[in-house]
Image: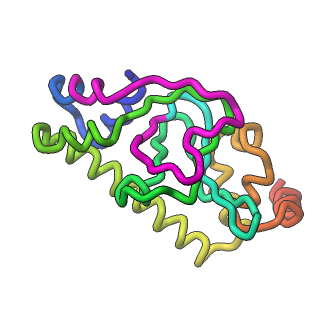
């Protein structure tokens, strides 16, 4: 749990009482590459923290596999549209590299908000940061070229070794052929 609380510390220093309460909402999972952490049609009731590994949120549109986002070691992943609405999601979470995950039961977590305002504040800050990242992603699509988006994505360490190129191309909204051209001119 140390990694999880180090992540939380980036947002807010928690009291021991808050840490103990939060820890009771958590469980550890181990998944293999290619497994789904959550499947299509499930309602998201869990927030995940990647202790190790890589995951992606994806969906199908007109039979085409489209990657919406990636999450890496030390990051949170959840299908928030389902988490906050209680509706089943049309998206899935897939593990791209063997992963060790801390699963936070969202129902239990939200139940702590009234008793521990500090926990509510922590997750508000986390969700605000996630929202800002989503806006940046949308703005990247609106205002930057595929090459600029690729360069920004490559700032993640060892990305090409961890993620198949077809998923990178899908995330960037381009074909694998276009990605190959961008990669060739970026070297």
Residue 55, placed above or below residue 185: above
As for residue 45 lying within the magenta part, the answer is: yes
At 22% from the left edge and 23% from the top edge, which residue is drawn?
20
Pick whichever, 114 or 142, lies toward us: 114
Q: Dividing the image into 4 quarters, which one contains the N terminus?
A: top left
At 25% from the left edge and 40% from the top edge, which residue is drawn?
12
Q: Residue furthest left?
A: 115
Q: How many marks?
A: 0
> In the figure, is residue 175 to the left or right of 102?
right
> In the figure, is residue 92 to the left or right of 28?
right
- Quadrant of the rendered image containing residue 171: bottom right
Q: Residue furthest bottom?
A: 142
In the image, residue 62 lies at what x, y percent? 74, 70
In the image, residue 141 lies at what x, y percent? 61, 72
- Quadrant of the rendered image containing residue 18: top left
> In the figure, is residue 102 to the left or right of 5?
right
In the image, residue 135 lies at what x, y percent? 46, 67
Question: Which span of residues is magenta-colored?
Answer: 20-49
At 18% from the left edge and 23% from the top edge, which residue is drawn?
16
Coloured how? Answer: rainbow
In the image, residue 47 lies at what x, y percent? 41, 41
As for residue 4 lying within the magenta part, the answer is: no
Pick whichever, 133 or 90, lies toward us: 90
């Amino acid at each position: 749990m140390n990694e999880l609380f180090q992540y939380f510390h980036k947002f807010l220093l928690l009291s021991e009482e808050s840490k103990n309460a939060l820890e009771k909402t958590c469980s550890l999972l181990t998944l293999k590459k290619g497994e789904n952490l959550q499947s299509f049609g499930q309602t998201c009731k869990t927030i995940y923290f990647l202790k190790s590994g890589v995951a992606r949120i994806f969906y199908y549109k007109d039979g085409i596999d489209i990657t919406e986002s990636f999450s890496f070691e030390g990051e949170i992943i959840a299908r928030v549209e389902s988490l906050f609405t209680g509706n089943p999601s049309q998206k899935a979470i897939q593990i791209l590299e063997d992963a060790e995950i801390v699963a936070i039961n969202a129902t239990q977590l939200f139940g702590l908000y009234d008793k521990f305002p500090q926990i509510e504040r922590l997750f508000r800050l986390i969700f605000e940061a996630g929202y800002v990242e989503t806006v940046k992603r949308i703005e990247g699509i609106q205002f930057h070229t595929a090459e600029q988006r690729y360069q920004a994505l490559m700032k993640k360490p060892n990305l090409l070794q961890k993620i198949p190129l077809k998923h990178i191309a899908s995330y960037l909204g381009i074909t694998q052929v276009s990605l190959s051209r961008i990669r060739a001119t970026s070297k």
